[in-house]
Amino acid sequence: MSARISTLTTAPAAAKSPNGETFRIAGGKTGVLLIHGLCGTPAEMRFVALGLARAGYTVHCPTLAGHGGSRADIVKSTWQDWYRSAEAALEELRQTCDTVIIGGLCLGGIIALHLAANNSDKVDGLALFSPTLWTNGWAMPWYSKLFSLVRSRWVANLMQFPDAESLGIKCPRVREFVRAALAASDGSDLGTVGTPGAMVFEHRRLVAAAKKLLGKIRQPALIVHSREDDYADLNNATYLQAKLPSATDLIVLDDSYHMVTLDKQRHVVVERTRDFVERIATGGNSEGTEVGGKSRPIKAA
């Protein structure tokens, strides 16, 4: 496949976020929609996006509704707003691409599950990076478990969850770069500092709705998750692998934390995602698939 990269462009998002921007890279008829995480921005997906673009794929990285602005902007949004903005981006990508794979980091992976279940004729595969059903990683504060008792968004909005000291990044150099950038940002570049309780509440509602849809998802899936994930334990990935009825590859990283698209093994993430997209685009089967449509965990050194 040719490695043609067009000029990186920004354009108005189909569903407006506060900064109203997204970015896309033009390529061939196979497209990849990359969805960022909670309180994040498309910058989280840029390294993967560029890696896929070099392989000739069209890549679209939208800003989810409510994101890319201040805390006041994001707390006005709901999970349905996030979903609708991602679905609008899918519709836009399908206008130029015959095959579409959806990739998502953390929250983005859960939105990808919704899109696959509700748009089976438009989504051909899923690449889930650190999919987060439960925030149960080793760096999560003890009181985060008590949040499950909160039943009101109004109460949730009185709370704030600070970022883990690790920021989800094992690589010290990348972590300090992100820390400095967050300190100097208004939220439009790398996302907000900390996570408002209302957004954790909306994430929980999104997950509850997604669990009811898992049986409808027939597209092949790739899951990339770290054994040392500080935000979401590996059991998030193994749960999805067990529940998804389609062929599902699980790549277990051993030298990264939660932000696998930015961390020490980001090159492995690009390589495995590129291989997965190529198999979908050429009609190949999922690597490592065993009897019954499931697959073995594949360790990535």
Image: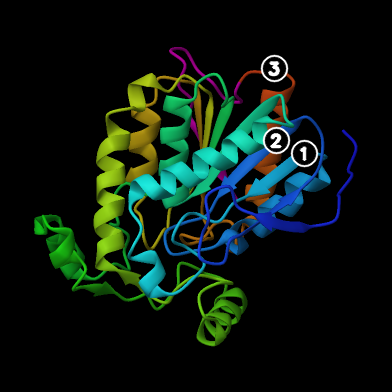
Whole-angstrom CA distance, mark 2 to mark 1, is: 6 Å
Instruction: Return the residue at label 2.
Output: 31
Q: Quadrant of the N terminus?
A: top right
In front: 121, or 161?
A: 121
Image quadrant of residue 198?
bottom left
Q: Residues within 10 Å of mark 2 (few under 14, many from 20)?
A: many
Give coordinates of residue 221: x percent, y percent.
52, 30
- Which residue is identified by label 1? 57
Instruction: Give the x, y percent position of residue 228.
Output: 42, 59
Distance CA(mark 3)–CA(mark 1): 16 Å
Alpha carbon distance from label 2 to label 3: 15 Å
Say above or below: 175 vs 131: below
Q: Kindly identify the amino acid type of the residue bearing the numbered disc 1.
A: Tyr
Query: Looking at the image, is mark 3 or mark 1 nearer the viewer?
Result: 1
Task: Report the disc number at residue 182.
Answer: none
In the image, 280 versus 166, the foreground residue is 280
Amino acid type indicated by mark 3? Gly
Residue corresponding to mark 3:
283
Where residue 297 sits in the image (x, y, percent)? 48, 35
Q: Which amino acid does the dot numbered 2 rest on?
A: Gly
Q: Secondary structure at mark 3?
A: loop
**Disc on the earlier residue, 2 or 3:** 2
Q: Earlier in the sequence, mark 2 or mark 1?
A: 2
Q: Which residues are magenta?
A: 286-301
Residue drawn at x 12%, y 62% is 146
Rendered view: 38 above or below 101: below
Rendering coords of residue 106 (x, y %): 44, 52
**Image-based side of 156 in relation to 276, left or right:** left
Does residue 88 show up?
A: yes
